[in-house]
Structures are given as structure tokens and as C-alpha cells.
Amino acid sequence: MGNFMIKIITVWSIAFALSTVAAIATAQQRFRYHDETETRPLTLQAATVDPGISRSELKESRTNLRVSANGIPDHLVGKFPNRGNPHQISEQKVNLKIPSNPKSNGSVTPLNLGWNFGVSLNGVAFDPLAAEFWQGNPRSGWSYNALGGAVALGLDENYAHVQPNGKYHYHGIPTSLIELLDYAPNRHSPLIGYAADGFPIYAMTGVVNGTVTQMTSSYRLKSGNRPGGGSPDGKHDGTFNEDYVYVAGAGNLEACNGAFTVSPEYPSGTYAYFLTEAYPVVPRCFAGTPDDSFRFGRR
């Protein structure tokens, strides 16, 4: 899958911007006004609260893996509501369909606002995008990085928070979950979950060419300053998703934070997505076709 990712990255970047704007425009939502232009250290809520009983079930058929869950994680969480997030965790009706035999399309599909990227084994969604935009305008072309710290989102130590409907979801590496799964940096990551297109999700380490390898993002901060004027000014520092650019070969992962790996679950090898310590942390595009059950925005 390596070559096609490199060839289409420019097209993908344009498609990402246009498709995101289109999705938002049709939703007819109102967004909070922001004019912050500098990153800030994240202040994370300590994960000390028991969220309740977690229920998650995976059933596999010949064509699909069905996930049924109540959206309650199987680990401690931060205090919600909190200063940056006024919402309370509540049970959800999680019913997702994951392709059992995922296939690459030969092109990538951008992750749009209103879609979950994937789901963890405990039934909690990976939803890395935030509905926060420069001056509250989704057409500005500048979307805030949920992990950039410029906008307080009330994230807890699992880099998660709660949507208005009570949905607890991960914006970054689910620290407590990978601890429960016995993650260790000297071996292949345990299976964390599945993406909407069916490929597995791992965290930070994989086996590549027979060697345990730290999986690294190929995204880098753009040089120089933002344009200013009708757009934000200041240097590209990670406040916005648009502060980053994919640089083929800068890391060992492709544009969708993916690579071929050999894992205990896939001894013959598979393409897989990896959560990374650096941006984008959670992937922002799909190599295959995401199942429509992962869409939660207006249809």
C-alpha cells in the first residue's frame, strides 16, 4: 500500500478539506466562536471515577464483525461534567458492523466530522475530530486540533471526553485501556480495536520485517506562519489540524497512520492502523471503505 499513499497525498488533502466542509454545511450546526492561535499544555482530568458497568460484545460472521455495547468504558475516567466539558457520561446504544475481510481501495477516504474512525474492544469510539473552528466558521478551513490545548475540551487522562448526548469517546491514546490490555513497548501492541473499514487498530509498536518497531507518524508541522487576514496568524504550532502536513518517509507510517505488520491476531500479516504519540495520534483517513454504521452525524 506504500506507493499509492504517497502519490495521492495532495489529492487527499484537498478532498479532506472539501468533504469536511460539505459535511458540516449540510449539518447546519452552530459552532462556538474561537480566536485562539497558540497551543497550550493540556490539563487532563485525573481518571479516578468509576463510570459504571461496561458491556461490550463482538460476534463474528462470515462477512462481518458485529459490535454491540453500551458505550461505558471498562476503566476509570475523569470527572464529568468538568470545567471544560459540561456533559455527563451516559449509556449509549452501540451497534456497529465491521467488515471481516477488509480490502484496500487503492485510494484513501478522508475521515469527516460526524464519523467515528473506529471502535475499541470495550465499545468506546475513536472520534479524533472536534467540532471547533476558527471564529466558529467551518468554512474558514481552520479546524482546531483536539489535542492542541488552545481550546479547553475537558479531556481526561484517557484523552477522552463526553459529547452532549452523553457519548464518551477517545480523541487520543486511551491510556487506561492499553494498560488493561497489558501494553509493553518491547513487544507488538495488543489489539486495541477496529477501524470502520475493518482493519485492526494497534498502539505505537508493531512487528515490521521481523523486528518490534516503534511506529512513528509521517506528519510534520509546516514551516513559517499562517496567512493571517481572514485566517489565523501566528506560526504553525499545532493549534490547528491544518498546521500539519504529511511528509512521505518522515516516519514509518503512511498517510492514514498505517503499515503492514505481523501480530498474534494476524500471524500471516495484515495492514493495520497505529495510534501514535505524535500527531495525528488517531488516524484521519481510511485505506478501505468505512461502514456506514460508524456515521453518527446527519445522513
Image (tube, rainbow, N blue to C red):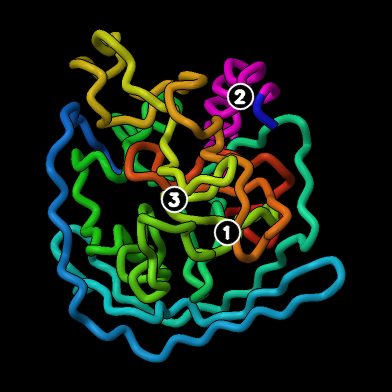
- Residue at label 3? 205
For the residue pair 121 and 14, the one nearer the viewer reads as 121
Segment tinted magenta in the rendering? 3-28
Give how far across and how far down residue 270 sits, in percent: 69, 50
User: Of tags 2 and 1, which is closer to the observer?
Assistant: 2
**Image check: 271 left or right of 250?**
right
Provide the residue designation for mark 2.
12
What's the distance in space between the residues labelled 2 and 1, CA to CA?
22 Å
Q: Is residue 288 left or right of residue 166?
A: right
Disc 2 residue type (three-letter): Trp
Percent of width and height locating residue 194: 60, 60
Residue bearing mark 1: 296
Q: Position of residue 62 (x, y in %)?
A: 87, 71
Is residue 161 shown in magenta?
no
Q: CA distance from mark 2 to mark 3?
A: 26 Å
Could you tell me the amino acid type at mark 3? Thr
